[in-house]
Amino acid sequence: MSSASGSDLPSGKKQLKVVETFRTSFANSLKGAAKRAKVKLLAGDVSVAVRGDYVIANALIAPPPGVLLEEAVKMFLVYVSFPANHPYAKKVPSGYYTIERLAEQKNPRAKVVNLEGKTVLELPLNIRKIELTPPEYDATVQEDISFGQATIEQAPETLYRLTRMQAHEVRCHWKIATWYWTWV
């Protein structure tokens, strides 16, 4: 590719078409994976992060009726892909998985479950809850909000030698000014 002239770059319309094709293809793949996993997705964000050979996509699973999102057992539908030399590459091959809360654990844990229902990995489940009093947040009451994130980052605690992939859920209940962050 000629970087000086940029003449080998596709036009803006072609670039947009590539992105739209990816979006449509990925959305269809995600819907198919949700159907195979027998879950319904929460309307909203699907986050995708790519860093070299690492890929993670995260969508929030809709909780059953009467269950709060932050208390649901099935939390995330993720697509993950590790580099071939990563220790998890054989244990967690590229594909879709659900992230599910393990019940009654002294320290919160989650399991990574493939679409056939087999647990392939267990991980710590990180949960943070912050409650604010009205003077602290000083905002008019709004609708409750939920969103998902996917991140890939170098881990500072290992002097940036390890790459960490994370799926996040953020939930805010405005009426009681409570925020929940959950991630694996």
Image: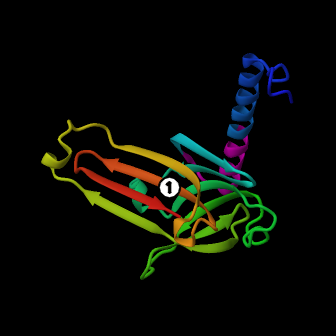
Q: Does 128 sit left or right of 2 as displayed?
A: left
Rendered position, 156 above or below 5: below
Q: Nearer the viewer, residue 114 or 26?
A: 26
Give the residue at the far bottom of this rendering: 106
Q: Nearer the viewer, residue 9 or 122?
A: 9
Residue at (44% x, 60% y) in the render: 182
Give the residue at the far left of this rendering: 135
Q: Main secondary structure of the magenta part?
A: helix
Rendered position, 14 above or below 118: above
Residue at (76% x, 59% y) in the render: 94
Q: Mark 1, residues whose alpha carbon is within 10 Å: few (<14), some, or many (≥20)? A: many
Q: Does 173 sit left or right of 12 as displayed?
A: left
The quadrant of the rendering that contains the N terminus is top right
Using the rendered image of the protein, determine whether residue 64 is visible from the camera's viewpoint: no
Q: Nearer the viewer, residue 29 or 15?
A: 15
Q: Which of the 4 quarters of the picture holds residue 159?
A: bottom right
Say what amino acid the circle numbered 1 marks: His
Using the rendered image of the protein, determine whether residue 16 is visible from the camera's viewpoint: yes
Label 1 secondary element: strand
Residue 123 x, y percent position in the rendering:
57, 73
Q: Look at the image and give the residue range highlighted in magenta.
A: 28-41
Residue at (65% x, 50% y) in the render: 34
Query: For mark 1, what is the residue?
Result: 168
Is residue 25 within the magenta segment?
no
Residue 171 x, y percent position in the rendering:
38, 50
Q: Does 134 sit left or right of 111 as displayed?
A: left
